[in-house]
Amino acid sequence: MNNLIAELIRSSKGYFHETAGVMVCFFNDPEQARRCAYKITATTGKTAEVCGNQLSIVL
């Protein structure tokens, strides 16, 4: 599932860092982060928390 989430992040033009069971993702603007969070939730069922141009996912 982590590979699927990573691909969704990359397809939304973001990048990420994975550590201690959490993926922290960064985008150029908040709208990109919100769209990616929606894609992740719709595809995997995991909740992605958005704060500005960053989102976090507990793995």
Image: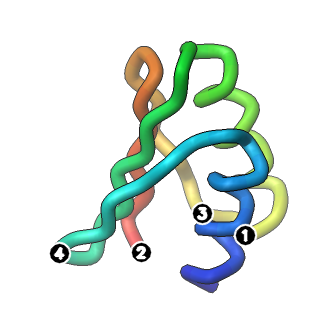
What label sits on residue 15 in the rendered view? none
Left/right placement of residue 39 relative to residue 28 reads right
Q: Which badge, 1 or 2, comes first in the chain's sequence?
A: 1
Kind of residue sitting beneath label 1: Thr
Kind of residue sitting beneath label 2: Leu
Query: Splitting the image into 4 quarters, where does residue 55 fall?
Result: top left
User: Residue 18: horizontal and vertical position, in percent?
Assistant: 31, 68
Q: Quadrant of the N terminus?
A: bottom right
Kind of residue sitting beneath label 4: Ala
Confirm or deny contact between disc 2 and disc 3 (CB under 8 A): yes
User: Residue 31: horizontal and vertical position, in percent?
Assistant: 67, 16
Q: Disc 4 designates what residue?
A: 20
Q: Disc 2 designates what residue?
A: 59
Q: CA distance from mark 3 to mark 4?
A: 17 Å
Query: Splitting the image into 4 quarters, where does residue 3 fall?
Result: bottom right
Total labels drawn: 4
Question: With respect to residue 25, does 59 lie above or below?
Answer: below
Comparing labels 4 and 1, the label whose residue is closer to the camera = 4
Left/right placement of residue 2 relative to residue 7 reads left
Circle 1 SS class? helix
Q: Which badge, 2 or 4, comes first in the chain's sequence?
A: 4
Q: CA distance from mark 1 to mark 2?
A: 11 Å
Circle 1 residues within 10 Å: few <14, some 14–19, many ≥20: few
Confirm or deny contact between disc 4 and disc 1 (CB under 8 A): no
What label sits on residue 44 in the rendered view? 1
